[in-house]
Image: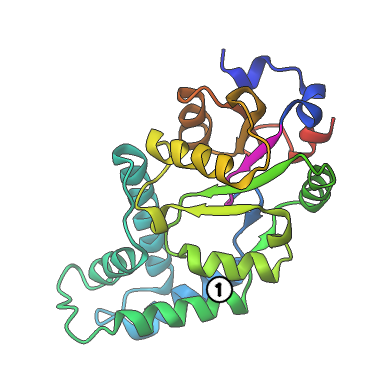
Amino acid sequence: MGQHQIIKLEKYMNQYQHYSFDLWLTLIKSNPLFKQERTRFFYTHFNPLQKPEAEVGRIFRKVDLMCNAINEKTGGNIDAEEMYLMVINEISDFSHSFDNIDLPALYQEMESLVLRYLPVVYCSQTMKVLQQLKQNPDTTVSLLSNTAFIKGSTLRKVLQQLELSPYLDFQLYSDEVGMSKPNAALFRLMLDTVAANRQQPAALADIIHIGDNKRADILGADAMGIATLLINSNHQCISTLLN
């Protein structure tokens, strides 16, 4: 039985000095309109075979799942630009030369779409929990997120827009450090960054990581001896931390 299953729920709020959060499907979730507009953009601009728009959407999902699985297996990080090129290549049945693709301009277009159709806070309890955690001056809070089609630099802007940034003492993104959860080195980096951001040291037993992905978040943190809490993909809500 994992540590997240045996710790009594009513102790979460006062037991820890540092709270590390996953981002996607933990604190925020995608805006469906963003995915629709992204699919439409690639359907219009990178679709020489005139595949149906729904097929372009399925290709995005396929590449997303594949790259996520690779990152979790290797502990590395496939960059957003590479993922967009994979999508373009599959849309064209692997016949695209890439010669005329301006990757910086393409990513800028995608960032503009993200900021136009912002992700949304996962649930009504999310802000309440972060606010209450930060009421304790001895508590620090951070983000540890694998990235995919959206870079950490863009996600920082998103969190600023969603007014979540003030509750985070620091943010770590896989594309910026070249490592993905459950890589032990990434959790070690998180622990080192916790130490650098606190006036008073936090023992390993005083740190918890919260996320929705059992493999990346829970097993990854468990392997480092970090306490964990699985939420959203099961029957637990982030509000469990306040119980």
Magenta region includes residue 21:
yes
> Label 1 belongs to which residue?
114
Question: Viewer-proximal residue, 14 or 238?
Answer: 14
The residue located at (72%, 30%) in the rendering is: 16
Does the magenta-highlighted stretch encompass residue 71? no
Identify the element where label 1 is drawn: helix
Residue 20, percent from left and from top: 61, 41
What x and y, as percent, mark residue 62? 36, 55
- Horizontal placement of 219 versus 23: left or right? left
Residue with the most extreme front position: 199
Front one among 160 and 215: 160
Relative horizontal placement of residue 208, taking residue 74 as reference (left or right): right
Q: Looking at the image, which residue is at 38% across and 48% down?
A: 68
The quarter of the picture where the C terminus appears is: top right
Q: Residue at x 77, y 48 (%)?
A: 130
Residue range highlighted in magenta: 17-24
> Up-down: is 15 above or below 70?
above
- In the rendered structure, the answer to whether residue 174 lies left or right of residue 233 reads left
Residue 139: percent from left, percent from top = 74, 40
Amino acid marked by disc 1? Val
Quadrant location of residue 100?
A: bottom left
The correct choice, above or below, for 10 with respect to 192 in the image is: above
